[in-house]
Image (cartoon, coloured by chain):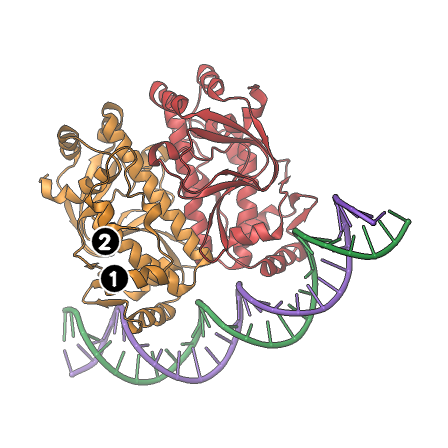
Chain colours: A red, B orange, C purple, D green
DNA sequence: CGTTTGATTGACACGAGTCAACACCAGTGG
DNA sequence: CCACTGGTGTTGACTCGTGTCAATCAAACG
């Protein structure tokens, strides 16, 4: 496993917990050779009991559930550096599925190795906990959006969040990031209809806040986009607890 | 700390991880004398960095966020046996608040003792992980409800979930449980307006599915309520991974 | 008793869903 | 080279679920 592919994960974990060189080496050592998965495939399905954990190196994937009436709700977007299913080791059975939204490069960590990382290395244990809990915080923020924000605000909030998350892993150009997805996917994420997604995108475009073309999203007016989306990055826990802030904090700001 | 008050927590944890007598003793030993908190008080506020974890022994509390426009979104209901903020130990800072919905009896575990439980006792470590991850699964299911279910289905789903959760802790009468809350609270939970909550309650009542009076909810037709709410308890992970099912599983069923 | 808080009801407004038509593009195959 | 296809984006007309506002009622309470 070359070091470069895992850099997004390392960058992200470093925000929450300072990892030493040896810590990183141990972590990277547990990650196996990646596989290439086409778009629209399931990495895991509901009810599975996988014996390894999935890690996104490149591409876009999502957590989702299918309902009895055939509709789909996306529960999380998984970008490079995200760990898909650390919780299965404890819960045993998947209560949702994970699928690719674009072609993905995916690496694995065997369940036994996960247990090893967690029990033998306090810093990595803490880092993986931190990662899981930030994912949960994101989930809470999405719930707020669904419950209390207008479709427009919710859309703006999602694009804002992704900008900051891509910056956390070091994968965002200054103001743009890859977003090779359809409006239908956005609809399944935001819990609205595809037609209405289209209307919201046009509204954001007309306001001069974003550009969304060629599979990439560009933020044209970050401050205003954050405002429309009622976005504040506090829930992403970018600020280290016990150490000095690094430049990322001030760059992302609020 | 008398054993009886902590029974709901023990009962719930036993569903996920089999705890020995000594495990239980260690856990109970870490829990301090409880306090009585009136309704409508905050146990923790956004931004706090508490040095102890809160445990609900009696009453009803909730996780919530306030938005810039003054509206509120409830993110989770905390019933007896629920641990409120295990994650603060790792994330450092609360990104949401926790408040009481009714008078509550609340006990505490010092942060240092939490660390002790987690590092010195593998079974308790696993049990607390399991508890956290089930909470996260509930959050995902709520997101599905907000995104893709009608207001009626969402309401039915909430009442179904609470029935099962109260049974998990042993606190539900056969078909009813305490629910001393206003329709406004339900509105903040479901992400709809108070007026519409009223309409949905009447619809459920007219269908003969529930009774909701004197601060208690009674389920009159469990099967039909589950059906209207598109409810399936899989996400609550009631079925043990490596051991025989106990009677609870079959009692809750499906 | 007034006062207050919450439940209930009806009229109306509005955001979002639905349906349908069309444009556009990438592939595909004749 | 062109017709054909299927998927996606775009637009408009219309419907419907839910929000909003306001009035009334019931219950709790000092």
N-terminal label among 2 and 1: 2
- Residue A143, position as x, y percentages in the image: 43, 51
Q: Are discs 2 and 1 located on one and the same chain?
A: yes
In the image, A88: left or right of B124? right
- Residue A116, position as x, y percentages in the image: 37, 20
Few, some or many residues within 10 Å of mark 1 (<14, 14–19, 20+): some
- Asked whether residue B185 is in view, the answer is no
Determine the secondary structure under disc 1: loop
Image height of A186 relative to C20, above or below: above
Rendered image quadrant of residue B7: top left
The structure residue drawn at horizontal position 14% and vertical position 35%, both measured from the top left corner, is B28
- Residue B212, position as x, y percentages in the image: 24, 67
Few, some or many residues within 10 Å of mark 2 (<14, 14–19, 20+): many
The structure residue drawn at horizontal position 21% and vertical position 36%, both measured from the top left corner, is B109
In the image, A214: left or right of B211? right
Q: Are marks 2 and 1 in contact (CB under 8 Å)?
A: yes
In the image, B104: left or right of B202? left
Residue B60 tag number: 2
- Residue A13, position as x, y percentages in the image: 46, 28
In the image, A187: left or right of C27? left
Residue B181 tag number: 1
Image height of B169 relative to B210, above or below: above
Determine the secondary structure under disc 2: loop
Rendered image quadrant of residue B243: top left
């Amino acid at each position: 496993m070359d070091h470069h592919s895992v850099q997004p994960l390392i960058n992200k974990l470093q925000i929450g917990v300072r990892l030493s060189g040896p810590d990183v080496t141990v972590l990277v050592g547990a990650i196996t050779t990646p596989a290439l998965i086409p778009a629209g495939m399931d990495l895991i399905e509901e009810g599975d009991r996988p014996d390894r954990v999935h890690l996104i190196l490149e591409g876009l994937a999502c957590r989702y559930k299918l309902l009895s009436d055939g509709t789909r709700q996306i529960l999380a977007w998984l970008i490079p550096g995200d760990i898909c299913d650390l919780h299965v080791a404890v819960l045993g059975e998947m209560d949702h599925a994970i699928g690719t939204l674009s072609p993905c490069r995916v690496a694995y960590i065997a369940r036994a190795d996960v247990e090893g990382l967690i029990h033998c290395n306090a810093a990595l244990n803490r880092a993986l906990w931190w990662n899981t809990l930030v994912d949960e915080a994101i989930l809470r923020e999405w719930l707020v959006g669904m419950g209390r924000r207008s479709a427009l605000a919710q859309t703006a909030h999602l694009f804002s969040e992704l900008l900051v998350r891509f910056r956390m892993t070091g994968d965002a150009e200054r103001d743009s990031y890859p977003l090779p997805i359809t409006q239908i996917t956005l609809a399944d994420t935001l819990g609205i209809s595809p037609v209405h997604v289209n209307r919201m995108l046009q509204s954001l475009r007309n306001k001069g806040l974003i550009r969304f073309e060629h599979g990439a999203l560009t933020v044209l007016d970050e401050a205003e986009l954050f405002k429309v989306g009622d976005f504040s990055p506090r829930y992403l826990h970018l600020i280290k607890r016990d150490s000095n802030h690094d430049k990322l904090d001030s760059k992302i700001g609020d």
